[in-house]
Amino acid sequence: ERQNPSFQRHHAEVNLGNIIVGCGNFSYAEIPNAYVAILGVTGTLKPLTNYEKKEIIENMYRIKKTTITPSIYGGSDCRFGKDNDVKLQISQDSFHQEIQKSIFDNFTKGRATLVFFRTNKAMRDFEESEEGMSFKAPRLKAIDEECDNIDAAVVKATTLEHAATLFPRVYGRGLDFKCRDRKMEGGVHVIQAFFSDSLSEEIQIKGRTARQGDKGSYEIIALASDLTVDLGLTQQELVQTHTNSKGSGLYDLAHKARLEKANEGVRKRLAQVKSASLAHAKSIKYRKALVEGKMELARCLQSEL
């Protein structure tokens, strides 16, 4: 490089900091196997499939003991029935109309409604539709996934009487939508405007209502085309199942499909982990040789990475 007529020393000094030297390929999935013990707390252990529990929790990480601790508030007082609270819509117009109807029904009862959408675009499509525009501001609000100022006051406002708030699915976890309005009968109503491809996400979104002993209700309003994309179910089998066995049949059909999808995802991840484990083992040996000052061995190992 120095022989190049255009070489400038100060440019080389600045750019040297951008040279990346490879020091191994480490697998995040393998790192916990080096721990002396694994202890953890999660609210979504129960919905794991049997395949996930066996292959990942038990076989891969050798976690043999789990304990399910009940809530200190007792059982949930969330009203949800598969037959009446799982609804399928074929067109986007009927999908928007069903969401609009549910929000209006809860408005008339003085209840707060939280609506969680599959994507940010789906949320905006409803907000800008004829049905969404039928709500006069500030009765209907939307919180974008790019919003970075979701503080306690904003969350509190979503659970007041006659409030309706739209969210993308990312807000279905973590936010504490506690209903502090004691005059509100029935508590907060949650509409999930899609069918989750994981049970843990469904449990999290459903858990945005009936919190800490409060009452609440939950329903799923799904668009057939979303179920086709997410779970591979055809519109024909969706409509036929929904017609013959109402919401419970639709729910069971979609739930079976997402379990199969989850298990297939586990199989793919385990294959990826297996293919990465060899490089991980070599990288661990390389790191050990460096730490112990065995430079010759380290150079040999480095050439294999």
Image (cartoon, rainbow, N blue to C red):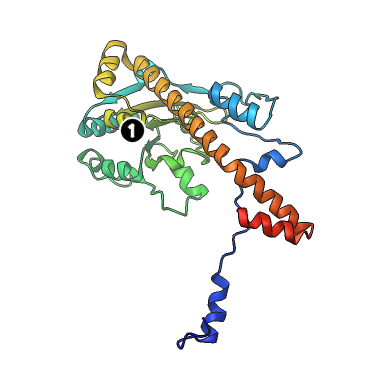
The residue under label 1 is 107
Q: Percent position (x, y) of residue 125?
A: 26, 43
The residue closer to the viewer here, 92 or 7, is: 7
What is the x, y in percent for residue 132? 26, 40
Instruction: Tell me if residue 61 can be seen.
Output: yes
Residue at 75 percent across and 36 percent down: it is 37
- Residue 40's spot in the image, x, y percent? 67, 35
> Seen from this angle, which residue lies furthest bottom?
5
Q: Quadrant of residue 60?
A: top right
Asked whether residue 179 is in view, the answer is no
Give the class, few, some or many, for how many residues have Cα within 10 Å of label 1's Cα (few <14, many ≥20): some
* Three-letter amino acid code at the position of disc 1: Phe
Left or right of 121? Residue 288 is right
In the figure, is residue 249 to the left or right of 235?
Answer: right
How many numbered marks does the figure carry? 1
Q: Relative to 37, is 144 above or below? A: below
- The residue at the far top in this view is 244
Q: Nearer the viewer, residue 92 or 299?
A: 299
Residue at position x 37%, y 15% from top? 248
Q: Assign a secondary structure to mark 1.
A: helix
Residue 124 lies, with reference to residue 108, above or below; the image says below
Q: What residue appears at the point 47 percent right and 85 percent down from the top-left corner?
A: 4
Residue drawn at 51 percent across, 22 percent down: 77
